[in-house]
Amino acid sequence: MKPLHRIFLLLTALLASYQVVQGIDGLERMAIACYTIAFGMLIVASLLMMILGFEVLDSPLVVISSTLIPASLALGLVSEYLDVILIPYGIFIVAGMLVILITRLAGPQKLAVIVLAVVHGVAGLAIFALPIILALRGDTKGGFAWVGIGGGLIGIGGLLLSFLKGGRPILPRETILTVLPSLLLLSTAAFVAGFAYL
Amino acid sequence: MPNLQTSISNLKSKYWPLTKPLQTGLLLATGLAGYMSARCPVFNMGTVLSVAGSLFLAISGSTTVNMWYDRDIDARMNRTCWRPLPTRKITPREALILGLALSALGVGWALAMDWLYGLIVFAGLYFDVAIYTIWLKRRSAWSIVCGGISGGMPVLAGRALGVGYIDWVGATLALAILLWIPTHILTFAMKYHADYQKANIPTFPSHYGFRATRLTIAISSVLAAIAMAAAAYGIGMAWGYLRLIGVLSVGMLSLAIAISVRPSERVNFGLFKYASLFMLSAMLMIVLDVL
């Protein structure tokens, strides 16, 4: 891992730490819990990659982690702005995570990839679209759309990583590893910027 | 001018390594964080500088005396044979005088500031030099417990200076350090197992095996995180910082599980680095919360 990658990962961890400490105070308890899980995963993942190198991505738990970040972020957003679908959406996320875990460990690979794509795709779409729609409709300040941009970026990173781990890489492994720290930093910066408009 | 540069460079290469700057720096940070955790007037720069100065002198003094006493072991181990005493950059007499002088100055300064603070600083030095290094290190694998106790003294001393007495928060902060020390020492004991064998130093890996040692590291890391979280709550840190300590603890727990289930030297060293980062971050958070 290049020194620049380590710097990007450290900055990601610091930005996400700021968000956990300061950026989500005053929100509803459910939203705080969801955002803490999402940004917490970003902190731990960045630190572990910084310390152990990209080899940490070989762990079977990476797929779960890379899905948990968008899933919990999306759940936090839904709990704040779309609480009418909170229960079905919550069930979908929890069930989806469980199915991903089971299919990762024991299921056929094709099914594992399909489940992963569905859960990741729905969560990613929610983080991408919801803040932008809210900002365009004037329900939140315009700057909140940055959360959507962050969602788009982390969605790309998560999908690249998930399909790489699923054995069907969209891009070569080296390319994915080169862009991953920058994608993590940019998406975290966009999240922090967006949540500042809440 | 070149003479001055040469003198500084000599001083740096001969005496500076005797103080183990990284370890001393980390312990110094815990002492300052302990003091600031009392939410006393932290902008009293005189007191802050005195805490830093007295702790730096006492910690680096005890480290230097330890190096003097362990010079025969250091010479036999690949990891330490480059140190100033085994390489004869300085004489044992020079190191002993320097170590005792630094220790006396540090403890004296601490006692002059506050008798309880000074007493705890002295206790740390006594545990480190007399009980850990001279008495137990060459006799028992359990000597690390005494090493841990002395490592917890700076934070306890800082806290006691701030609040005026020894409270449960200070004791819990010291406990967190005590539980963190095995992660540090036992990781080294495994990584440099052959070195310790060569020097005839009893260690956990040589007495109880690598598996038991990894389990000990995992358990003590998790307990250190729990103690740190309890102390942070006791200090009354903001919820945001408590959340962050919780998040970092989960990372530590994950690594602890990883080294227990799928042991490897890489993950083992990863836990060691993460635990150091955890402790430093926790101390930084205590300071930031107060500021």
Image (spheres, coloured by chain):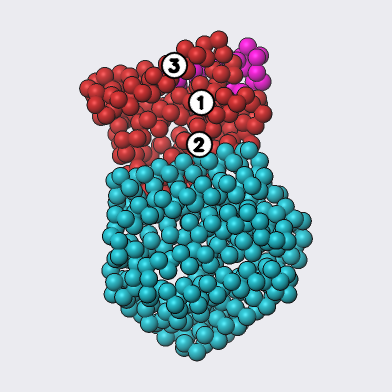
Chain colours: A red, B cyan
Mark 2 or mark 3, which is nearer to you?
3
Q: Tag 2's secondary structure?
A: helix
Q: Residue at x 30, y 25 (%)?
A: A102
Q: Position of residue B216 (x, y in %)?
A: 38, 55
Give the letter of the chain under mark 3: A
Q: Is residue B257 depicted above or below B16 in this figure?
A: above
Other residues around mark 3 within 10 Å, as few (<14) / some (14–19) / many (≥20): few
Give the letter of the chain under mark 2: A
Q: Residue at x 67, y 71 (%)?
A: B118
Amino acid beneath label 1: Leu
Amino acid beneath label 2: Gly
Q: Tag 3's secondary structure?
A: helix
Quick one: label 3 or label 1, which is nearer the N terminus? 1
Q: Which residues are magenta?
A: A121-145
Q: CA distance from mark 3 to mark 1?
A: 15 Å
- In the picture, the disc for residue A91 is 3
- Residue B41 versus residue A66: which sits nearer the camera? B41
Q: CA distance from mark 2 to mark 1?
A: 11 Å
